Amino acid sequence: MIVCYNILYKVLNIPNWEDKLHMSTRIYDCLKAIGDKIIENKDFLTDLDREIGDADHGVNMARGFQSVIEKVSQDDPDIGACLKKTGMTLLSTVGGASGPLYGTAYMEAGKVLMGKDSLSAEDLKLALEAAIAGIQKRGKAEKGEKTMLDSLIPAYDVYSEKIASGASIVDALDAACVAANEGIEYTKTIAATKGRASYLGDRSIGHQDPGATSLTYTLETIRDFIKG
């Protein structure tokens, strides 16, 4: 029966029903998983930031997501509303540039998903697109400036290409995570032109960007969560 439904959905060009089922009413659990990943790696993220920043990225992000876990309702199935609350919480609790950038990313993603209690592959694409636009507007940043966009934009591009070719949301996210990790490696090869790291100029070359790293953790956690 499942095979028949999948064939029908493919013929009618409707997103695979399994792709929508995975995230249904479980947004809190996904956000908690992201928070747990950030908290688990807070020391590493802070060490990365110590090399080129204020040595607080991991600590700040961990504190922010601890607040998210406490403030987002476990019973609210509205993905957009939960993302909006996540963004507002990060904005108010995470210091430095990360709070405004991550906060804006989550709030903008929340706007396009407001009222939804499940995600299709296209929904996730639109959410990533909105997050990128929000970060670019808030941070006046573009790809190639040693920021989280150096992981997020390549991940979005690959994800979009995979979805357009008919890949499942999991396969598309697998490819997106590979691209995001390649983005991390790319940040080691360029000088920072934004934030505290920009003060170092060429001395920032050789160091990976903490924001690109925490962003990649986020994407990997979403992928693993959807995989179940």
Image (cartoon, rainbow, N blue to C red):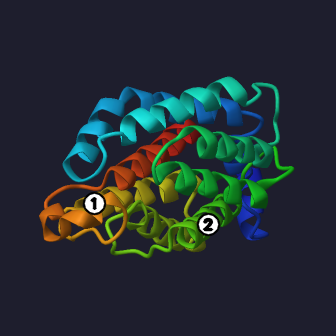
Q: Which residue is mark 1?
A: 197
Q: Residues within 10 Å of mark 2 (few under 14, many from 20)?
A: many
Q: Quadrant of residue 148?
A: bottom left
Q: Would you say residue 16 is visible in this rendering? A: no
Rendered residue at 44%/45% (across/down): 220
| Left or right of 31 on screen, residue 190 | left
Rendered residue at 19%/48% (across/down): 51
Q: Nearer the viewer, residue 94 or 73?
A: 94
Q: Which mark is residue 134?
A: 2
Q: Secondary structure at mark 2?
A: helix
Q: Is residue 101 above or below residue 227?
A: below
| Left or right of 72 on screen, residue 175 | left
Circle count:
2
Q: Position of residue 155 (x, y in %)?
A: 45, 64
Please state, as top left, top right, bottom left or bottom right, where the C terminus lies in the image: top right
Amino acid at dot 2 = Gly
Q: Please report whichever mark, 2 or 1, sits nearer to the chain's N-terminal start.
A: 2
Q: Nearer the viewer, residue 18 or 212?
A: 212
Measured Cα–Cα span from mark 2 to mark 1:
21 Å
User: Most extreme residue toward the right, as rendered?
Assistant: 115
Q: Position of residue 158 (x, y in %)?
A: 46, 69
Asked if marks 2 and 1 touch (Cβ < 8 Å), the reply is no
